[in-house]
Image: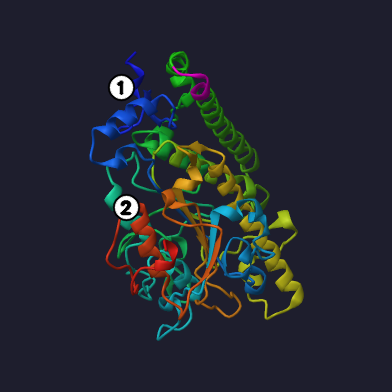
Amino acid sequence: MTSPNRQFDPRRRSLLRGAGILLGLPALETMAPFARRVLANSVDSEVAKAPVRMACIFFPNGAIMPKWTCEGEGEGDAWKLSPTLEPLAAMKSKITVIGGLEHENGTAGKDGAGDHARSSATFLTSSRPLKTSSRVKLGVSMDQIAAAQLAGKTHLPSIELGLTASRSAGSCDSGYSCAYSSNISWKSETQPMAKETTPRQAFERMFGSGDAHSRREQNFVRQSILDVVSEDARRMMKTVGDTDRRKLDEYFSGLREIELRIARNEEQDRAAMPDIEVPYGRVDSFREHARLMFDLMAIGFQTDTTRVATLMMDTAGGNRSYIDVGVKESHHGLSHHQNNPETVAKIELIDRYLVEQYAYFLTKLDSIPEGNGTLLDNCMVLYGSGLSDGNRHSHDDLPLILAGGGGGRIRTNRRIVAKDSPPMGNLMLSMLDVLGTPAEVIGDSTGKFAELTS
């Protein structure tokens, strides 16, 4: 076995290879001595620093803004979480709530109806979609601007995830292509990035190699990653200290637990689906589905498998029901609440429930030590919608939260309210700067959102 210093070269990260599996390891104390020597002999201080990661999470249909909007403005105790955002109480010191940004390109203009399709299309592009059901045209999304510059530095430039299957053909909203409603990630003006909605497929894409579809078609049963690398892991355990040994044990246990959860979920699906059509969305599994995807993103960031991820909680105008919180009606239908108190109360339950899933992801990231802090400290995790008031189809004062310190570049525990309704594209430019993948312009941006890093 190679010496620890060679094995844990921070420029390449450690990789375990076996049976077509590619697996990165978390940062270990064993890496530190070599990292310090590299730093001492290099003019590039970034070599030994943890990379910044970015995740963007979209939820549809806007929110009940009076219950979303926080009290106060500024830093620390100057502001308080709103009722909808109360599930983030434990994470308050590591989030920034942002108000006042808009997507002018999401408004009707001369295009008429179709606000839901425009809300997802503009979310990370800040661009106006061409109203068509076939020849789509939009703009490159923030995540793909970053992925293009990070290509080759990680196993995957980016990972696109969702909890509802995509549709790329036909019209889904008043003459707009389903591609707009189903995707927030766009590689080019005409090419959306198809998202993975099945945990197993996402797992294979992140940690497998080769053609996963072909392997499934051939009914190939892939041996567990932990079984493949167990011998290497046991040998490695003997060469590291107690702290690193605990880290490795927690890491491998976490990865095993995710695999087992995926396997259990697949067994439930097979049992439920032999001869009947399963109800749309399988609402009872929404929470587990969401948290599996969040766990996969966390491990993807932890192992530096990817530094860019997106997740759609549902498609734009999504009709999911949320039985877990006692809401049987469709989300989209309820969003046109016409200020009916009973309907508004149901949307409030959904808004808070979705924030709870976001809080779970942040807690997960914050539980993973990295450097002098946690993985969350080296992340930017954007959560928001392309609509504010779903009843009015408003595209101004968007509901947005940015969690994580961006590697020390972002001051957190703040509520920022932008003046004069700047485009959300300005925030994207500043986030790209923090990630180290700058851009001159994105969509209708007019400059950087200086408040983010001031």
Residue 159 percent coordinates (x, y): 41, 47
Q: How is the image coloured?
A: rainbow
Mark seen at residue 436: 2
Residue at x 41%, y 66% (from the top left corner): 427
Say if residue 170 shows up in the picture. Answer: no
Helix, strand or loop at disc 1?
helix
Q: Is residue 146 left or right of residue 346?
A: left
**Vertical arrangement, residue 16 with respect to residue 131, above or below:** above
Residue at x 67%, y 70% (from the top left corner): 67
Residue at x 62%, y 60% (from the top left corner): 320
Say if residue 399 shows up in the picture. Answer: yes
Q: Is residue 261 left or right of residue 240?
A: right
172, 416: nearer the viewer: 416
Marks 1 and 2, Cα distance to the nearest angstrom?
27 Å
Look at the image and tell me in which quarter the C terminus lies: bottom left
**Vertical arrangement, residue 123 with respect to residue 277, above or below:** below
**Vertical arrangement, residue 162 with respect to residue 261, above or below:** below
Residue 122 percent coordinates (x, y): 42, 69
Q: Earlier in the sequence, mark 1 or mark 2?
A: 1
Residue 70 percent coordinates (x, y): 63, 68
Q: Which residues are magenta?
A: 240-245
Location of residue 171 (image quadrant): bottom left
Helix, strand or loop at disc 2?
loop
Q: Is residue 404 magenta?
A: no
Residue furthest to the bottom: 110
Residue at x 32%, y 15% (from the top left corner): 2
Name the residue carrying label 1.
6
Question: Which amino acid is tagged 1?
Answer: Arg
Question: Which amino acid is tagged 2?
Answer: Gly
Residue 254 percent coordinates (x, y): 55, 31
361, 287: nearer the viewer: 361
Q: Main secondary structure of the magenta part?
A: helix
